[in-house]
Amino acid sequence: MRFIGKELNYLHVCRRKLWLFRHGIRPEPENELVQLGMLLGESSFRRNEKEIAIGEIGVLDWADFKDGVIHETKHGVSPGGGDEAQVRYYLAFLNGRGIPAREAVIHYPLRRDTVTVPWNDEAAEMVDADLVSCELVVSFPPPAAERKPYCKRCAYEEVCFA
Ligand code: SF4
């Protein structure tokens, strides 16, 4: 079973969210936060090469392959380390195909902050564990909706708590 980077992110944010996404239930594009994310992705790195597809698992916002650094832009921090899980998966994908990538930098323009995620043996084990967990989540009926502090910012809120 092949997963995309966003799904590994959702695994850490909310397993129900992963399940809903995987089963074709998608948030409305007019959701403000989704729109903001798109806007930031389009405007933050105008001077750099952007949107580099990596197989079918995701799209890098920007990469410096000479230095082995990939970049991801986020409008907000995903709870539970989802952002880190997503870029760790991208690093695994690249290194597994002979493209050396030593770290990922996650940019949070609204917070004027960055987080660096290294690629090493521990990271590889974390990716393997995430993929096993993703497969388990989507293979069973959907996890129940449990209200979390960040549900009100989730595009699936109406699906979960209508
Ligand atoms: S609204 Fe809450 S429970 Fe529903 S998918 Fe989003 S985070 Fe999960």
Image (tube, grey):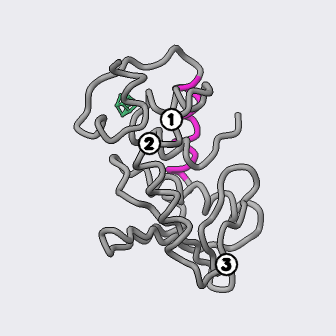
10 Å neighbourhood of mark 1: few (<14), some, or many (≥20)?
some
Q: Position of residue 66 (x, y in %)?
A: 68, 85
Q: Tag on residue 27?
A: 1
Find out whether the residues at labels 2 and 1 contact each other: C-beta distance under 8 Å.
Answer: yes
- Dot 2 or dot 3: first in sequence order is 2
Q: Amino acid at mark 3?
A: Glu
The residue lying at 38 percent from left, 68 percent from top is: 108
Q: Mark 2 — residue?
A: 31
The residue lying at 33 percent from left, 73 percent from top is: 113
Q: Mark 3 — residue?
A: 49
Of residue 136 and residue 73, the one placed in the foreground of this image is 73
Nearer to us: label 1 or label 3:
1
Find out whether the residues at labels 1 and 3 contact each other: C-beta distance under 8 Å.
Answer: no
Residue most toward the front? 30
Q: Position of residue 33 (x, y in %)?
A: 40, 49
Of the four image quadrants, the one with ligand 1 is top left
